[in-house]
Amino acid sequence: MIDTAARWHLSLVNSISKVDSLAGLALRLYLAPIFWMAGTSKLAHFNDTVAWFGNPDWGLGLPLPWLMAFLATATELVGAVLLALGLFTRLIAVPLIVTMVVAIVTVHWDYGWQAIADVNAPFATDRVTEAAAKLERANSILREHGHYEWLTSSGKFVVLNNGIEFAATYLIMLLALLAWGPGRYFSLDYYLAMAVRKHASKALRE
């Protein structure tokens, strides 16, 4: 029984290893457009981004706001391109991880876990509970005075809680890329590593 289970497990692992490169590809293709949209948004409203980074009253109150905004924007834009190509994946994962940690600590931490307020989800806070009551009141007003069916035809209304959920998810995905790399066959890193090994092997033979 144990030998059969072990052979089955080994067979499963060998089968999965043949397509394990798809995991790195999936992570990269998921993250690349997210960082690209975030970077292009900051770039399009760069002065507003600088003001938000630096203002201690309604912003983040970060030091050197112009430099911080530039680094965040450049990291997201360059990171998106490199992730899509699978080039220098582990290298670019590091500043992207730093960006996510800073976002978690400075932007999202005070709002708890949930990105979208849902009183039935785990880790619901008092803020989320209050948001549910406000959302129900808003829906009630819209049912009575608005074109509710038309307004909700593209999806139901929600309250943005702005917790760490999304940023933490991206952070975990980046940590996976840092640990496992971009995947074989579908990344430039793979072919770059092959070329380096080929060159090193040739140099050793000479």
Image (cartoon, helix red, strand yellow):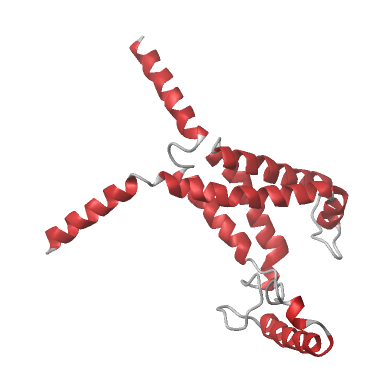
What residue is shown at x 68% (from left), y 73% (from top)? 155
Q: Quadrant of residue 145?
A: bottom right
- Asked whether the viewer can see residue 100, the reply is yes
- Nearer-the-camera pick, 144 or 160: 144
- Nearer-the-camera pick, 179 or 159: 159
- Asked whether the viewer can see residue 64, the reply is no
**In the rendered view, does 27 fall on the left or right side of 151?**
left
Identify the image quadrant of the C terminus. top left
Where does the image place residue 92, in percent across and percent down from the top left? 60, 41
Where does the image place residue 80, in percent across and percent down from the top left? 64, 44
What residue is shown at x 46% (from left), y 33% (from top)? 190
What residue is shown at x 61% (from left), y 80% (from top)? 124
| Depicted 128 relative to depicted 47: above or below | below
| Depicted 153 relative to depicted 190: above or below | below
Where does the image place residue 188, in percent across and percent down from the top left? 51, 33
What residue is shown at x 57% (from left), y 52% (from top)? 30
Q: Quadrant of residue 162?
A: bottom right
